[in-house]
Amino acid sequence: MSGRTASPSGSVVDRALAAIERIANRLPEPFFLFGALYLVVAGVSTVLAAAGVEVRAFGETKPLRGLFSGPGVEFLLTKLGANFIGFPPMETVLTIMLGVGLAERSGLLTALVRWGFRGAPRWAVPYAVSFVGISASLMADAAFIIVPPLAMMVFKAAGRHPVAGLLGGFAAVGAGIALAPVVMTIDVLYAGITNQVSESMSIGGSVVTPVSNYYFSLASSLVLTVVAGMLIDRLIEPRVVRAGVPRDETAATADPTLDDVGLGKPERRGLTRAAASFALVGVLMISLALWPNSPLRNAEGGFLPESPLLDSVTTLLFLTFAVPGIVYGAVVGTIARAADVPKMMAASLRELSGFLITAFMLGQLIALFNWTNLGGWIAVSGADAMRAFSFDGYLALFGFVVLVSLLNLVIVSGPGLWSITAAVFVPMFTLIGLEPGLAQAAFRVGDSATQIITPMNPYMIVVLAQLRRYEPQAGMGTLLARMLPFVVPFWGVWMLVLAVFYFADLPLGPGMEVHIGR
């Protein structure tokens, strides 16, 4: 069927999304799009700086700085390379992809997927991918790199469309980036920011702990797992099929072994030894961490909120994929000599060439946005507008989530955005009798819901590169149009979960109520 022909049952949705895709694909390539946005930020910041605009937050005042000025020219000329190399995802993406590339090219990942899903019912695959994607926020931003391609492989092994798995995996990770069924590092960060605001302003309410949003996060993760699974199964995959998206890769990296879900004796032996090597790495790292004088502990002897162990996540994930990948390849023969290892790693980096080019420009844009203080000005201005409308109760929460969802399109750092908005909204909510922990829970909704449709999310270009393995002509508009069906249901259902907790006055977590004094 033609990629632009909609079925009668989905004609309205298909036509709307196809129109969005056509319009968005008329935008230039991401490299030039980010370049254009760079010029916009440069111009706007210069005008505002010339007008003497300032940002007031955290008890201090910062002037807006314009690129077209003396300091701006200095920033442009001296920080170009640093902005590229210091682009936040660069360290994570390149390092982890070296390990993932070894595991993929040795055949480990395909064998693991075929073994794990050889008897899984096809209907359950979307829900399994959704649960794994939401729970994978334990890996922080690395989940954006690891889960979508694995979900793609899982779908193909189950006889379903791999592109639907790729899109669903990315959407699930985006939805779960601020929540998971277990306590995460980001819970510690958010609690620290919230308490810092509460203490500095001497406002009321309970002290926020890392588990203050646990009940809300657990309920949200379970509900969103079902919603995401249903969307993948009943909307995304049928639309991908109707659009005529190929089920096989067009790139040279296509892996035909996924067409056969059976495993031979060498592969089973390779999986066994790879699992043993994985367990060995795990035992060694746990032993090192539990050692009383471990270098992985912080100065207080613990691991939270910060420690060398948490800073080692990228390295641990690299070892998790690289070591079992090498062992598996040596057993089954895909790695016949030592020289094959760097060759496989080099091949994985070649696939990232498009990401590196786009990352160069995106790194410049994000660095300029931060240097000009324009992001902080936008956030504070939005908060001031909400206060001017005198929102109250659940309406205040609703307006706050809308504001955060919009701000998240330009400020994708969760802790960074919460640092800005908490200074305004935590005291604002306490004044109307709402706990600081509720403001934090509402922030999670807005911060996650629009993660998957903002071009400022650096991992969008990573997923776009994966999508182009099946659709070489796919553009940013293609990806955005296929992510939009997730955003509105995620946002709406999540707001319903928040409404249930608010109106039923359910505790958000241990020791954290919705209203102060209840």
Image (tube, rainbow, N blue to C red):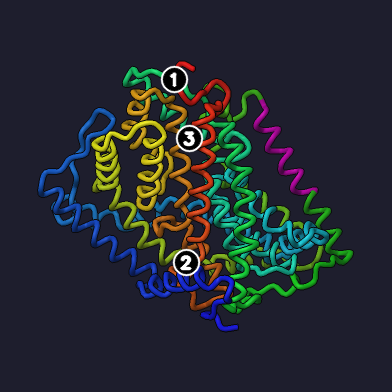
| Residue with the mark numbered 2 | 481
| Residue with the mark numbered 3 | 441
* Residue 7 position within the rendered picture, expressed as x and y whole percent measured from the top left: 58, 76
Which residue is pictured at 38% across the width and 44% down the height? 404
On screen, residue 282 versus residue 85, left or right, reads right
Residue that extends furthest to the bottom in the rendered view of this protein: 2
Q: Residues within 10 Å of mark 1 (few under 14, many from 20)?
A: some
Q: Amino acid at mark 3?
A: Ala
Q: Amino acid at mark 2?
A: Ala
| Residue with the mark numbered 1 | 516
Q: Which residues are magenta?
A: 276-291
The earlier-in-sequence mark between 3 and 1 is 3
> Label for residue 112?
none
> Is 284 included in the stretch rendered in magenta?
yes
**Camera-side residue of 244 and 391:** 391
**Distance (Cα) linking label 2 and label 3:** 28 Å
Q: Residues within 10 Å of mark 2 (few under 14, many from 20)?
A: many
